[in-house]
Structure formats: structure tokens, C-alpha cells
Amino acid sequence: MPNHSLKIRVEIDNDANSELCDGWTYGYTFPNDGNWDIWVCPLACRHGRWCLGATIIHELFHECHQDNPWDEEKAKGAEKACGFIDVCL
């Protein structure tokens, strides 16, 4: 079994090093790229700790479900299963 590590990276401003932290995005990941990295955008941090937690759970779902990593509805279901219900509004 391969030895994987997961890094959670927090962008401190929308201009950091990603076009994906566009002011509308809470977080993102690139499943299957081999890096196991999750980026958290400033928007999630500005919305508070519950939104930050929901964002991490959401992106972990994408990393862990490689069979269909782009399934947004199931990722949102993972948030709800962990008690994060509509916390990033």
C-alpha cells in the first residue's frame, strides 16, 4: 500500500497562487493528481470555523472517493452527515 500524506493548504489572499480562489470558492482539490492536497480559500475562513470545517470535510470526500471524485451532491451529503448543514451561506 502506498504511503500517502495529505496537506491542507490555506490561501491567505485571493491572489496567492491559484486562480481557483476567486472570491466565490470555499476550497478545492484535484483528485487523482497524486498530491493529496486540499486548498482552503479565504472565503471559507471569513465565513467562520463551521464553514471551514465543512469545507475540509467536503474536500476530503473528493480526495477519498476516487471512483467519482467530482460528485458534488455526495460531497455535500458528507458535510451534512458530519453535522455541517448549510453553514457556508
Image (cartoon, helix red, strand yellow):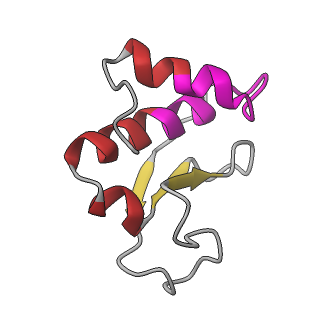
Question: Farthest residue toward the top?
Answer: 81
Name the residue nearer the viewer: 57 or 34: 57
Say how many tags the image has. Answer: 0
Question: Split into 4 quadrants, where in the image is the N terminus?
Answer: top right
Name the residue nearer the viewer: 48 or 62: 48
In the image: residue 22, left or right of residue 55? right
Q: Position of residue 70 (x, y in %)?
A: 75, 35
At a point 72% along the width and 32% down the height, the residue shown is 69
Is residue 63 covered in magenta? yes
Question: Farthest residue toward the bottom?
Answer: 15
At a point 40% along the width and 63% down the height, the residue shown is 43
Residue stretch in magenta: 58-76
At a point 46% along the width and 44% down the height, the residue shown is 5
At a point 54% along the width and 26% down the height, the residue shown is 76
Which secondary structure is most common in the magenta stretch?
helix
Question: Farthest residue toward the right?
Answer: 67
Q: Where is residue 45 in the image (x, y as percent from the top left)?
A: 30, 60
Q: Position of residue 81 (x, y in %)?
A: 41, 12
Is residue 62 covered in magenta? yes
In the image: residue 77, left or right of residue 30? left
Question: Split into 4 quadrants, where in the image is the C terminus?
Answer: top left
> Is 74 rendered above or below residue 18?
above
Which of the 4 quarters of the picture holds residue 12?
A: bottom left
> Is 14 rendered above or below residue 64?
below
In the image: residue 83, left or right of residue 25? left
Q: Position of residue 52 (x, y in %)?
A: 31, 47
